[in-house]
């Protein structure tokens, strides 16, 4: 109780939508911004104590970039891009070694709900190997997602190497295609995520 008083006297915004047990998970953090972040997403996503514990265990706050943390502190407007975690951790429960994009895609698809949760809030799965025609050639988007919170399509490209310039060029082509041919007028612009070995 003493620790509870010491922490919440400093000013985190308490919510009556969370239980005492939620706050007991947070009182050991020294960073008030971190506490406020977990309170905010617990309320927004209606998280149980167990779900909150899982986010803390996965270092959800630490995986946000510094710009996003600043936006959260100063209540600035955020977009879906701000909440993409880095790194994105993908649990490989198969016996297969991830040596190709196809194997990586298979590992993700075997537990797509867990993967979507790792990305952040509001992601839904549309299709894998989404077929598009550019000129006379067919191309395949590794994963096409939609974020209902931010009302936009999300193109995901999987790479088992470190990030290269051509990967960025490739995903820009796919983003432009979705914006021109699939996106409705009331939807926000498509974003792209490249998952690779190194940032």
Image (tube, rainbow, N blue to C red):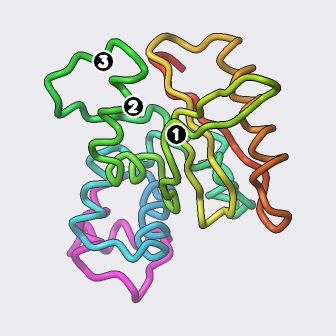
In this image, 178 relative to 47: left or right?
Answer: right
The answer for how far apart the CA atoms under marks 3 and 2 are is 9 Å
Most extreme residue toward the left, as rendered? 95
In this image, 1 relative to 158: left or right?
Answer: left
Q: 150 and 140: which one is in front?
A: 140
Q: Quadrant of residue 185?
A: bottom right
Most extreme residue toward the bottom, as rendered? 16
Residue 143 - label: 1
Residue 105 - label: 2
In this image, 159 relative to 20: left or right?
Answer: right
Q: 127 and 107: which one is in front?
A: 127
Q: Quadrant of residue 89?
A: top left
Q: Quadrant of the N terminus?
A: bottom left
Label 3 or label 2, whichever comes before in sequence order: 3
Q: Residue at x 67, y 42 (%)?
A: 67
The answer for how far apart the CA atoms under marks 1 and 2 are is 8 Å
Look at the image and give the residue range highlighted in magenta.
1-29
How far from the left and from the top, in percent, is residue 45?
44, 72
- Is 167 rendered above or below residue 14? above
How far from the left and from the top, in percent, is residue 34?
45, 54
Q: Secondary structure at mark 2?
A: helix
- Is 34 rendered above or below residue 198? below
Q: Quadrant of residue 115?
A: top left
How far from the left and from the top, in percent, is residue 23?
30, 72
| Residue bearing the label numbered 3 | 98
15 magenta-colored: yes
Most extreme residue toward the front, as rendered? 136
How far from the left and from the top, in percent, is residue 105?
39, 31
37 magenta-colored: no
Label 1 close to label 2 by CB (< 8 Å): yes
């Amino acid at each position: 109780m003493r620790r509870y008083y010491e922490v919440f006297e400093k000013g985190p915004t308490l919510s009556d939508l969370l239980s005492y047990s939620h706050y007991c998970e947070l009182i050991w953090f020294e960073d008030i911004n971190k506490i406020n972040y977990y309170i905010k997403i617990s309320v927004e996503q209606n998280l149980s104590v167990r779900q909150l514990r899982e986010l803390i265990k996965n270092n959800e706050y630490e995986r946000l970039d510094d710009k996003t943390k600043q936006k959260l502190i100063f209540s600035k407007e955020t977009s879906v891009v701000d909440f993409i975690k880095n790194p994105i951790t993908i649990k490989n429960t198969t016996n297969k070694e991830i040596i190709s994009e196809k194997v990586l895609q298979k590992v993700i698809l075997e537990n797509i709900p867990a993967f979507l949760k790792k990305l952040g809030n509001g992601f839904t799965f549309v299709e894998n190997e989404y077929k598009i025609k550019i000129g006379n050639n067919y191309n395949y988007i590794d994963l096409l997602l939609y974020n209902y919170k931010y009302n936009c399509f999300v193109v995901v490209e999987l790479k088992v190497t470190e990030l290269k310039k051509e990967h960025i060029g490739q995903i820009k082509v796919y983003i432009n295609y979705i914006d021109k041919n699939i996106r409705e007028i009331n939807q926000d612009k498509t974003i792209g995520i490249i998952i690779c070995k190194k940032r």
